[in-house]
Amino acid sequence: MRGFVPRTVALAVGLCLSGIALADKTVITIESWRAEDQAIWDDLILPAFEAEHPDIDVQFKPTTATEYNAALNARLAGGTAGDIITCRPFDNALAMYDAGNLSDIKDLPGLENFSDVAKGAWSTDNGDATFCVPMASVIHGFMYNKDAFAELGLEVPATEAEFYAVLDAIEEDGSYIPMAMGTKDQWEAATMGYTNIGPTYWGGEEGRLALLSGDAKFTDDAFVEGFRQMEKWVPYLGNGYQAQSYTDSQNLFTLGRAAIYPTGSWEITGFQENADFEIGAFAPPAKDADSSCYISDHTDIGIGMNAATKNKDAARTFLEWTTTAEFAGLLTNAAPGFFSLANHDITVENDLAKEFIAMRGECEATIRVAHQILSRGEPALGNHLWTLTANVINGSMTAEEAAADAQANVDSWYTP
Amino acid sequence: MSQSAPSTRAPRAGRRWYILVFLAPATLIYTVFAIYPIFESLRLSLYSAEENQAVFVGLANYAKLLGEPYWADQFWNAFNNNVVLFLLHMLIQNPIALALAALLSIPTLKGAATYRTIFFLPTLLSVVVVGFIWQLILSPLWGVTPDAMKALGIGDLFRPWLGLESSALVTVTLISIWQYVGIPLMLFYAALLNVPEETIEAARIDGLNGWWIFWKVKLPLILPTLGLVAILTYIGNFTASFDIIYSLQGGMAGPNFSTDVMGTFLFRSFFGFQAQLGDEYMGATVASALFFIILVGVGCYLFGVQRRLQRYDS
């Protein structure tokens, strides 16, 4: 008992002092949907920034990915959102800018380190304003179980014909599910399926821009073919794929039960932690030996500033830092699979990430087809493709019907 | 008594202040958290956003909700699913609850307390937990169901029910019934215990057996509870169904919106979902439509059914 009073006093004084110490620092918080990356930001990225800027305390406060948009919009409306906001590409962030929630940062020093394509994902249609610093892109492709391929004596497929030959061989052997993908969560089907292999058939950027200019339609053979490929995938998916969720697919692959997993580079960290076999990656197979391959190198993450922030200077300082080579290097190697969009020369260390980034040299790059402009209808085409692709795989729509539906969605509001 | 002797009544305002005190907490809480938000969302549904400004548009949002194919299709799909959900609950959940309550209220039943607890337990679980557990149980990959069915020799009948358009809604409903059967069960049980012993004894002396006592004596006496359960099911089906569907099937209420109900539809329209941006005005319109649907249902019950129900005093 005797020691109690002095100890309490000491504690109280200590608390006051630490309060004073905190008061000297500007605290800014980051909104993000990458809850998986908490440790990376806390242990690697933010300490590096704080070492240079001891007067700023940055806190990474993510929300679950599926709830991010809804929760963030509610917080922005209520005035309780963080100072720094991680931006989804295109219309989602554009709507936030239009609503006055994101600051224009076109004059931010360091923004010249990014290509126009990268900045395009976070600029107004006419390019007058840029509201997020491009942060990272993800590359789509396929991951495969190297041990399984070695065991079955399979080679990485480079063309469509080889791809189906490999799938047939795995199917015939029977010890692995050829491909891990389900339709329960719907977005897998569209993101890992249609937008992953589709560019091969519509010729990447060429096809995407033709859609925007009105020269091409979803009902064109080049776009229907993507859906037809989805129909062809069905026999290779596991039993009960209709009720297989995204996490089910991830587990099927990392537990070594499925040989091929249509996916993107964002899975690298998690998969390398969980899988006890070696994982390799290959790009979406080309149509035939004479055609080139296409990848979706999707501008996925940007970072911007809450227009209502009370710590404008600190937030700007942080954003400026995200344009530097230091940040790009930290991010690329701490979160392998998220490739910095900056023009800095960065060495990728992770082997699997290297395989993905090598695809940039071998294949033509494009972005997800429905993200720029085309998702402004009701329902947003980006979401609608989820439903359509899942329907095609589940057999409740034919490829032609799905394509016609997608085109009807665009026609209902868009004039090129 | 006081009516016959008005002179003894206390002067009103001064001495009856405690009535206000007792009413205050409930009134305040309901006003702030229920009544005010309802009026606010009704008001919001009459506005629309134009260049970031709220503009009064009258009933245009309602016309859009029921007129434009994109909104109307979703609305009627969600509404129909809600109706199916309600009917299934009425046809499956409530009869099961009644039957279990009738069995539990048999005085000679041993271990009634244990059964009661077991039946009620799922209700206490978080919906998220229930959703997760059932997803695992029914999973074609790791679930116990495919193996269990194989052991029983009916393995061929297994389907990924939650993922099929034809069966997803029924499966979700059955899961919801499994979870919530405890609530009507408890209400019926309490009502059955309230049936006076003398009445039952009289019926027995008149020569009725247990089966007929239930149908001719107990059931008529608990009719008000039956009505109450029906209306609670009706309201819960429109409001609470969101939880289980969101946790089992996600915000897109797949496959192909076959499990979409008013709640998930409201969620998507108000908050947006992934690439779909939220629209608070259309969201408020959906919420208001939902409010009116419930209002009409409850109104019909209050004026059409409840007034005709005879209450027998024991």
Image (cartoon, helix red, strand yellow):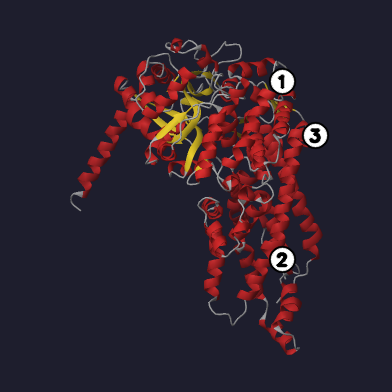
Residue ID at (54%, 34%): A165
- Of all chains, the one bearing label 2 is B
Say if residue A33 shows up in the picture. Answer: no
Q: Are marks 2 and 1 on the same chain?
A: no
Confirm or deny contact between disc 1 and disc 3 (CB under 8 A). Answer: no
Q: How many marks?
A: 3
- B168 and A133: which is toward the camera: B168
**Residue tagged 1:** A414
The amino acid beneath tag 1 is: Tyr
Amino acid at pointer 3: Gly
Question: Against A2, is B184 above or below?
Answer: below
Which mark is drawn over residue B226?
Answer: 2
Quarter of the figure with the N terminus of chain B: bottom right
Q: Nearer the viewer, residue A163 or A369?
A: A163
Location of the C terminus of chain B by quadrant is bottom right
Residue A85: x, y in percent?
A: 48, 26
Question: Looking at the image, is A203 positioned above or below residue A401?
Answer: above
Left or right: A261, with A9 as reference point: right
Same subunit: marks 1 and 3 = no
On the rendered structure, is B88 left or right of A114?
right
Above or below, A192 against B240 in this view is above
Crowd around label 1: few <14 · some 14–19 · many ≥20 (10 Å):
some
Q: Amino acid at mark 2?
A: Leu
Element type at mark 3: helix
Residue at numbered disc 3: B67
**Disc 1: host chain:** A
